[in-house]
Amino acid sequence: MKVLFFAMLRERLGCAEIMLEQPEPTTVAKVLEQLKSHSQEWRTALENQELLAAVNQSFVSFDAIVQKGDELAFFPPVTGG
Amino acid sequence: MAELYNELSQSPAHGAVVTFTGLVREMASGELTHLTLEHYPGMTEAALQDIAEQAMSRWPLGEVIVIHRIGRLALNENIVFVGVASGHRKQAFEAAEFLMDYLKTRAPFWKKEHTHEGEEWVAAKQSDKTAAQRW
């Protein structure tokens, strides 16, 4: 599955997009935990931040299921308008 | 802007037209050089469509127009335009306010402020969250 990062989160991770191997369906929360274990830098960027998530371009809660082929995105609270 | 107003005021059934424009404003320190607006291609369009459809299902509206610019914007440039046409002014005012409250909390855009010293991401405001919750 594809994971996208936006705005300040993207800058702190130094990454806009990553492909994750995820053969089994899992939750958004579990994917986030997996991403935190990527490096200490990533753990710092992802921990203790207010983050929002979207799956296939719709907002979801962190207990939503994601599976192979999905597009998952994490980003800070939005500031448009 | 005139074309947008013309589009909104087409129908003789809709005697009320309300529009809102948001512009790039100065920072308290007076040092803003420009803003950049990041967005999530695909989701941003879908979110704006969804927000407009929600407004149309809650109020009897004729035309609804929502425009949001992206990329680099200078001081005083237009960022966002919301326009609604309705039979009566109460619905038009309420729908326009709803569209802005939802757009500010549910559309994937992120603003970054640039000065000569550097740049900083704008933080989301609790007041915007609270405003969206009342609908």
Image (cartoon, coloured by chain):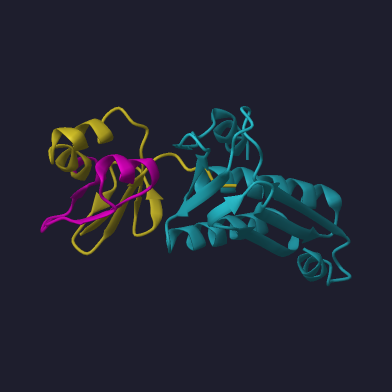
The part of the image, by quadrant, that contains residue B32 is top right
Query: Residue at point 42% right, 56% down?
Result: B40
Query: Residue at point 20% right, 37% down?
Result: A42
The part of the image, by quadrant, that contains residue B48 is bottom right
Image position, residue B36 (x, y; %): 51, 49
From the image, state the color of chain A.
yellow
Magenta range is A4-30
Image position, residue B13 (x, y; %): 86, 68
Q: Is residue A43 magenta?
A: no
Query: Residue at point 60% right, 47% down?
Result: A81
Q: Can residue B107 be seen?
A: no
Relative vertical location of residue A68 with respect to residue B38 in this rendering, above or below: below
Depth check: give the residue in front, B88 or B79.
B79
- Extreme-front residue of the structure: B116
Count the marks: how many?
Answer: 0
Q: Is residue B53 left or right of residue A12?
A: right
Q: Is residue B90 left or right of residue B123?
A: right
Tell me the quarter of the image containing the N terminus of chain A. bottom left
Q: Can residue A23 be seen?
A: yes
Q: Is residue A10 magenta?
A: yes
Image position, residue A62 (x, y; %): 30, 41
Image position, residue B46 (x, y; %): 49, 62
Depth check: give the residue in front, A22 or A64.
A22
Q: According to the colouring, which chain is cyan?
A: B
Depth check: give the residue in front, B56 or B1.
B1
Q: Is residue B86 left or right of residue A32?
A: right
Relative vertical location of residue B10 with respect to residue A47 in this rendering, above or below: below
